[in-house]
Amino acid sequence: QVQLVESGGGLVQAGGSLRLSCAASGSFASINFMAWYRRYPGKQRELVASIPSGGNTSYADSVKGRFTISRDNTKNTVYLQINSLKPEDTAVYYCNVHFVRDGISFSFWGQGTQVTVSS
């Protein structure tokens, strides 16, 4: 059993910043891929940023230069620093983590955290 606990969402004015966190716990041998997605109402989740175990980050074009993904492997936690927030960043943000247990890789989702940006 694994668990992901997200935190850090909220209401912020345009131009502000937020830091999202996603902490993993439970039974697993290691963590490979970690990522953040977001979902607009009525839309599919879209990939925002990712960071594999090797640490080479990747970002959606819409967030490059404003979002920074990082991970602390000692805490099994992935972060998303969001700067220069825009109203179009308003969405529910989900972390996605790929665990390895008993030689098998599996993916798990966080519960989601709402980010609302006022203009």
Image (tube, rainbow, N blue to C red):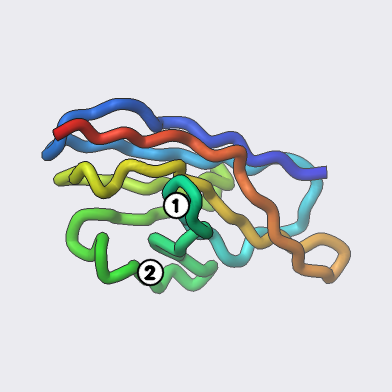
Q: Say which mark, if any, is on residue 38.
A: 1
Left or right placement of residue 50 versus residue 82 in this view: right
**Residue at coordinates 20% horizontally, 31% vertically from top-left?**
118
**Residue at coordinates 45% horizontally, 42% vertically from top-left?**
92
Mark 1 element type: strand
Near mark 2 (Cα within 10 A), the count class, few <14, some 14-19 or many ≥20, is some
Q: Quadrant of the N terminus?
A: top right
For marks 1 and 2 on the same chain, the one whose residue lies earlier in the sequence = 1
**Residue at coordinates 47% horizontally, 31% vertically from top-left?**
7
Find out whether the residues at labels 1 and 2 contact each other: C-beta distance under 8 Å. Answer: no
Q: Position of residue 72 (x, y in %)?
A: 47, 49
Q: CA distance from mark 1 to mark 2?
A: 17 Å
Q: Is residue 5 above or below residue 101?
A: above
Q: Say which mark, if any, is on residue 114.
A: none
Residue on which disc 2 sits: 57
Q: Is residue 32 above or below residue 113?
A: below
Mark 2 element type: loop
Identify which residue, 83 or 57, lies in the foreground: 83
Q: Which amino acid does the dot numbered 1 rest on? A: Arg
Q: Which amino acid does the dot numbered 2 rest on? A: Thr
Left or right placement of residue 70 versus residue 95 in this view: left
For this orientation, the residue located farthest to the front is 42
Q: How many marks?
A: 2
Q: Quadrant of the C terminus?
A: top left
